[in-house]
Image (cartoon, rainbow, N blue to C red):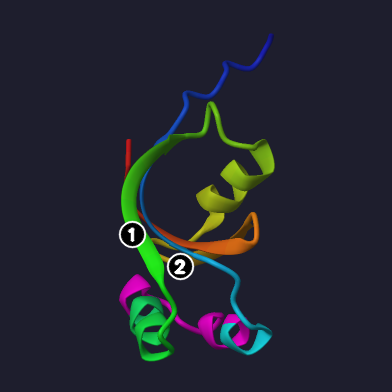
Amino acid sequence: ATAEPQAATTYVIDMLSTGPLSPDLQQRIKPLNTLQAVEDLLKANSIAFSWRRFEASTATLNPAFARHLAALPPREVFVVPQGPGWSIGVIVGSR
């Protein structure tokens, strides 16, 4: 018998995108556990960022990244390099 393919999950993600961050600032982001705390830190250090909400399907995500997202505790902040900058996000819903 073959296993049934798993249905794709669509995540609703709030994301902050920044340019390059100093190693010090990268370390200061690690213990933060809310997107608001990250936003406050960026503002306090005059770091420009953009905010967006978008949907991402596990059917189109890199499989390793999709597994990483699935393993996150609810509303846990995640940080990923994005070109020369960083993306800091949190899953706010899924279906």
Q: Nearer the viewer, residue 49 or 32?
A: 49
Nearer the viewer's eye, disc 2 or disc 1?
A: 1
Q: Nearer the viewer, residue 31 or 6?
A: 31
Q: Which residue type does callout 1 highlight?
A: Trp
Q: Residue at x 56, y 80 (%)?
A: 30
Quarter of the image where the C terminus is located:
top left
Residue 63 x %, y %: 65, 37
Q: Is residue 41 left or right of residue 92?
A: right
Q: Secondary structure at mark 2?
A: strand
Q: Are there few (<14), some (14-19), or many (20+) residues within 10 Å of tag 1? A: few
Q: Are there few (<14), some (14-19), or many (20+) residues within 10 Å of tag 2? A: many
**Residue bearing mark 2:** 77
Q: Residue at x 55, y 65 (%)?
A: 79
How many labels, in total? 2
Residue 70 x %, y %: 52, 48
Asked which quadrant contains residue 10, the reply is top left
**Residue bearing mark 1:** 51
Residue 85 x %, y %: 59, 63
77 w.r.t. 28: above or below: above
Q: CA distance from mark 2 to mark 1?
A: 14 Å
Q: What segment is highlighted magenta in the picture?
A: 26-36
